[in-house]
Amino acid sequence: MFPDDEACNTYVEQLRWPKGFICPACGKHSKCWHQTRNRLVCSYCRRQTSITSGTIFDKTRTPLTTWFEAAWHLSTSKNGLSAKTLERTLGTRYRVAWTMLQRFRVAMVRSERERLSGYVEVDETLLGGADQGGKRGRGASKSVIVIAVEVLEPKGFGRIRMRHIPDASGANLLPFVSDFIATGSTVHTDGWRGYNNLSQKGYTHKKTVLSTSDDPAHVTMPGVHLVAGLLKRWILGTHQGSVSSEHLQSYLEEFTFRFNRRTSKSRGLVFRRLIEQSIQSNPVTEAAITHGYDW
Ligand SMILES: [Zn+2]
C-alpha cells in the first residue's frame, strides 16, 4: 500500500482530516492545494501546513516510508521488536530505529486513557536488578511496577494498566489507582498498608491478606500474576532484558498497548490505530526521549 512517501502522505492526510482539510493556522474548514506532496496551502489564509506538523513524525529526518515500515513491523509481530532487530530489518542506524520505537511508545499511550472498571486486581511486581543470591546485575536495584488488571465475568481478563513507581508506598499506589481505575469499582489487593485508604477514595476494597490465606499469590491474584509473568518474559525475550530504569515506563506503555489489543483479529487495524495515534500525538523531540520520557 505504501510504495513511496507520497502514498504515506496521502494516508496521513486522510486520517488527519477525514472530513476535509481544517487549516491549523486559521481554523477554517477550507479548501487547500498541495504545494509539494507534504505541504498544503490554505485557500483562505494562504498559510502553509506540513501534513506531518504537530505529529510524532514532525521534525524528524526519517522518511515516512521508513516510519510506516517500522509501524508495520511493530504492529504485526506478535511480541514487538527491539531497536537492534529493527535496525537490521530496516537497514537504518541503530539510533534512528531506537528513537522511532520510543516515539511510537509515546503515541501508544494515547488510547489508554479510559479508566479500568468493574472488578480490578492491583499488585506490585519487581523487575530486574539484583538476583536473589545477592549478585547485582548492571541495573543495580530492582524496579517496582504496579499493575492493575480487569477481571471479567465469568472468566478471563480485560484491560491492564502499569506504572513504574519509585517504591510501593501509599503515596505512589493511591494515585495510580485513582488515575487508572474508575471510582465505584471493586479493587482487590493484598493486605499491604499502602492500599489502606482505598475505601475512603470511593472504591470497594477487597483485601486478601496472604499470610492468613492458604492460597499462593497466583491463585488469589491470577490476573496480576499472569501479566507480571508475560511482562518479564517479554522484556527478557524481545528485549534481552536490556531495559534501563529510565526507559522502563516506555516499555510498559508498549506492553499495555499490545496486551489490550491481544484479541484484535486484524493486524492491519492495529497498524492503522498506531498511525492514527501517532498523528494525534504531539511532536516528541529527541531531547525529550534521550533520558526517559517524562510521563
Ligand atoms: Zn487557513
Image (cartoon, rainbow, N blue to C red):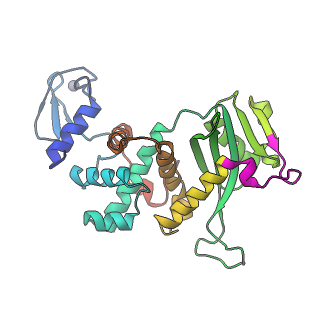
- Give how far across and how far down residue 50 sits, in percent: 22, 39
Residue 258 seen in this snapshot:
yes
What residue is drawn where x is 60% and y is 49%? Answer: 163
What's the residue at 38%, 64% (across, down)? 83
Does 45 sit above or below residue 267? Answer: above
Identity of the residue drawn at 72% across and 37% down: 187
- Residue 50 in view in this figure: no
- The image quadrant in which ligand 1 is located: top left
Looking at this rendering, what residue extends furthest in the front direction? 154
Can residue 15 be found in the magenta stretch? Answer: no
Q: Position of residue 178 (x, y in %)?
A: 67, 36
Comparing 259 with 133, the one in front is: 259
Front-lying residue, 275 or 158: 158
Q: Compared with residue 50, is residue 105 higher up or lower down, i.e. above or below?
A: below
Q: Is residue 23 left or right of residue 177?
A: left
116 is higher (above) or lower (below) than 137: above
Rendering quarter of residue 148: top right
Most foreground residue, 247 or 219: 219
Q: Quadrant of residue 30?
A: top left
Horizontal side of 66 relative to 226 (left or right) equals left
Magenta highlight range: 207-222
Question: Residue 109: x, y in percent?
Answer: 47, 43
Q: Is residue 263 left or right of residue 170?
A: left
- Name the residue at 30% across, 68% down: 88
Q: Tell me residue 39's x, y (percent).
A: 16, 38
Q: For the N terminus, which image quadrant?
A: top left
In the displayed structure, does residue 44 sit left or right of residue 76? left
Most distant residue in the right direction:
212
Instruction: Give the total number of marks visible in the rendering.
Output: 0
